[in-house]
Amino acid sequence: VVVTQFPGTLSLSPGERATLSCRASPSISSTYIAWYQKKPGQAPRLLIFGTSSRAPGIPDRFSGSGSGTDFTLTISRLEPEDFAVYFCQQYGIFPLTFGGGTRVESK
Amino acid sequence: EVQLVESGGGAVRPGGSLRLSCVGSGFTFDDYGMSWVRQVPGRELEWVAGLNWNGESTGYAESVEGRVTISRDNAKNSLYLQMESLRAEDTALYFCARGRGSGSYEALDVWGQGTTVTVSS
């Protein structure tokens, strides 16, 4: 399954809404889509699993949606600590695959 | 505290071998599937290999299939990645990660800090 993320970079200001897209080809069950946050020098952090379920401790400004081939991660109001790279992953079919990432940078 | 600690990385020549290890603590290791994920700094994450709680179901990325073997020893709370015929493109930071459940097909909810593999002549 090829996972494609877009845009490659989002330039936004704190307080703004971020919408990140992920496309899986061929389609994948929504049970098996996850989103991770990655900051330099840190391990990846699971944000969302099963397309829309927040991992423990993840703030409710992070939400996931989608089905079939198209999935979305939304950050409702960007906080300073949210500027990072975000990766989408399908984990329903071997080999598990990640998208190329979306960098959310401060405008 | 739930923790994963990797070791075994280092510098190796092309064609060489390495065995990475990961020790889990703070949780019941054999309740969970596990994976190895790598990243060249500044680039995308790449899932390398994964297995279920008892190691009987395994999967590999196409880029490493036939050259790496993932295994686990639940008595030692340990995960391994045996890497053979290493190539320059295997150079990366290798993370050990825990699946949310016991299967092979799981989102990864706990990650180590990684161990660096450098393949160079």
Image (cartoon, rainbow, N blue to C red):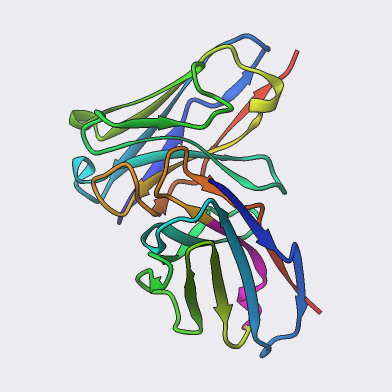
In the foreground, B95 or B50? B50
**Residue A21 appears at what percent x and percent y?**
62, 68
- For this orientation, the residue located farthest to the top is B15
**Residue B4 appears at what percent x and percent y?**
38, 44
> Where on the picture, by quarter, is residue A4?
bottom right
Task: Quarter of the image for the C terminus of chain B: give it.
Answer: top right
Task: Quarter of the image for the N terminus of chain B: give it.
Answer: bottom left
Identified at 63% across, 83% down, the residue is A78
Identified at 49% across, 56% down, the residue is A27
In the foreground, B13 or A86? A86
Residue A35 vs residue A81: left or right? left
Q: Is residue A86 magenta?
A: yes
Identified at 72% across, 49% down, the residue is B42
Residue A55 vs residue A102: left or right? left
Residue B35 vs residue B53: left or right? right
A103 is higher (above) or lower (below) than B36: below
Q: Which residues are magenta?
A: A79-88
Identified at 42% across, 50% down, the residue is A91
Residue A97 vs residue B106: left or right? right
Q: Is residue A18 magenta?
A: no
**Residue A36 appears at what percent x and percent y?**
52, 61
**Residue B28 appears at what percent x and percent y?**
19, 46
In the foreground, A47 or A32? A32
